[in-house]
Amino acid sequence: MTKVPFTYNADSFKVAIDCIVFGFDKQELKLLLVHRNIEPAKGQWSLMGGFLSQEESLNDGAKRILFQLTGLEDIYLEQVYLFGDINRDPVERVISICYYALIKLEDYDEELGQSHDAHWFPIKARPELIFDHEQMVDAALYRLRRRAGYQPIGFELLPEKFTMKQLLSLYEAIYDRDFDEGNFSKKMLSLGILFKTDEKLRGNSKKGSFLYSFDQAGYESVKEKGFRIIG
Amino acid sequence: MTKVPFTYNADSFKVAIDCIVFGFDKQELKLLLVHRNIEPAKGQWSLMGGFLSQEESLNDGAKRILFQLTGLEDIYLEQVYLFGDINRDPVERVISICYYALIKLEDYDEELGQSHDAHWFPIKARPELIFDHEQMVDAALYRLRRRAGYQPIGFELLPEKFTMKQLLSLYEAIYDRDFDEGNFSKKMLSLGILFKTDEKLRGNSKKGSFLYSFDQAGYESVKEKGFRIIG
DNA sequence: TCAAAAGTGTTCACTGTACACCCATGC
DNA sequence: GCATGGGTGTACAGTGAACACTTTTGA
């Protein structure tokens, strides 16, 4: 009979968490990037990151890091992939958990962000990123596209109330393609996950367009049988 | 101007790799499990696992562990998720990378497996697993199902040459549902990723059924435009 | 009344599904 | 021949894509 070991005999690793923060601004999908404030590569653009600590789970670590940057809690967060090439960080061996977050720009704390030297970039016009962060963005975007096709996560990027046109623009931004307005509207309404308010938004339209909100209860009652939003 | 640090100031973690090994046997999707040989939970069923070491990347670590168990190299391997709850391992804090592998049963080294006390279980009749390994299996199965819907990974579980019926049975096992034989056959053939050999297998059939193989070249030429196998 | 944008309807092609039918072969 | 299982054909319903059309309302 063997003794219970107090600890396993194995190598140890520092574990980073890097967050891709997505936002949606009118027409564009955007990315929150920070200037790295330590050497090497100090001053270059990087994802918001930090190190996992012993007292927290992975999700809690990601939440903590996001709160530090955005001041937001209760935001949509999904683990994407663990990156662990030997030399991915030139300083020392660090494995990094890639998360992505979806936030509503209206809730974002601009001042807090500026104190971290954070800036929003259009996803299609982002600067070069350090290390393997470019790969991370690609992986997160790929995951977001897949996920948004069968789960109603797009709403995380919109205000509580939004027009059908805004929703359309969002999906066009995510998938980087055009959708037919009429067909998109019909498809969305047919899913039974939108609540039509009686408010109208009069922007550059004379007729004005109705505001919708995500219908959580409706979603709960239809998600069982599964559906496809896009793709 | 700050100095370049020699190392980051952060906590360290032991990193495990746990592998879900899928196999396909006639009608059933199976899972390779081992008897855990250290305390605690010694003797209980567990996924094949090991610890990541400093000299290898994540994928290399997973390959090494699989080679130890199955004697196989060049097998299909995909990272699924990183599990890191604080108390997921009762001995100490260990974060664990979950991988799944698809292997051809005919290539599996039965003796090597037995030396590790490894056994195949039908996925639907598997024993209780230690720690969070049950969650890992669920996550891997979910990923496998999604992935098999739009990438030709099912073939990794079949012999080089197979009948349409075998392919059908495989997909039925993966998705745990029935498919119409005729429609399945037409769909598969229409994708342009199957090569029809001139060999026939005469099993319990009098007419005999043609053997097919996966057409890699055909796949390369059609994968760009994307397609949906199932779902 | 007209222009602009919202929202609806119509048509067509395509895909998935259910199921009937034909085909090759050993007995 | 005939039973058996492999393979193909057909008819129908549902969905997506393209685009025309109607509605609302400020100017």
Image (cartoon, coloured by chain):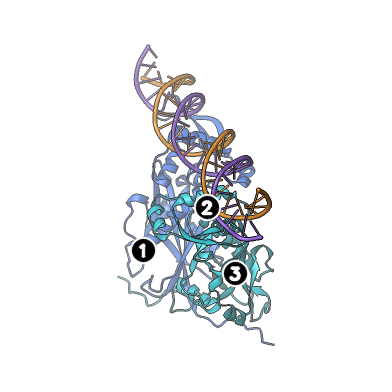
Chain colours: A blue, B cyan, C purple, D orange
> Disc 1 marks which residue?
A36
Q: Is residue A54 left or right of residue A129?
A: right
* SS category of the residue bearing label 2: strand
Amino acid type of the residue that numbered disc 1 sits on in the rendered structure: Arg
* SS category of the residue bearing label 3: loop
Q: Residue at x 62, y 72 (%)?
A: B33
Q: Nearer the viewer, mark 1 or mark 3?
A: 3
* Chain containing mark 1: A
Labels 2 and 1 positioned on one and the same chain: yes
Mark 2 crowdedness (10 Å alpha carbons): few <14, some 14-19, many ≥20: few
Q: Residue at x 50, y 80 (%)?
A: A11
Q: CA distance from mark 2 to mark 1?
A: 24 Å
* Chain containing mark 3: B
In depth, the one of A212 and A43 nearer the eye is A212
> Disc 3 marks which residue?
B86
Quarter holding residue A129: bottom left
Labels 2 and 3 positioned on one and the same chain: no
Q: CA distance from mark 1 to mark 3?
A: 29 Å
In depth, the one of D4 and A64 nearer the eye is D4
Amino acid type of the residue that numbered disc 3 sits on in the rendered structure: Ile
Q: CA distance from mark 2 to mark 3?
A: 21 Å
> Disc 2 marks which residue?
A76
In depth, the one of B10 and B24 nearer the eye is B24
Q: Residue at x 42, y 40 (%)?
A: A169
In depth, the one of B115 and A174 nearer the eye is B115
User: Of marks 2 and 1, which one's residue comes earlier in the chain?
Assistant: 1
Quarter holding residue B4: bottom left
The answer to whether B159 is drawn above or below residue A10 in the figure is: above
* SS category of the residue bearing label 1: loop
Q: Residue B193: where, in percent of width, then height?
A: 44, 55
Quarter holding residue B205: bottom right
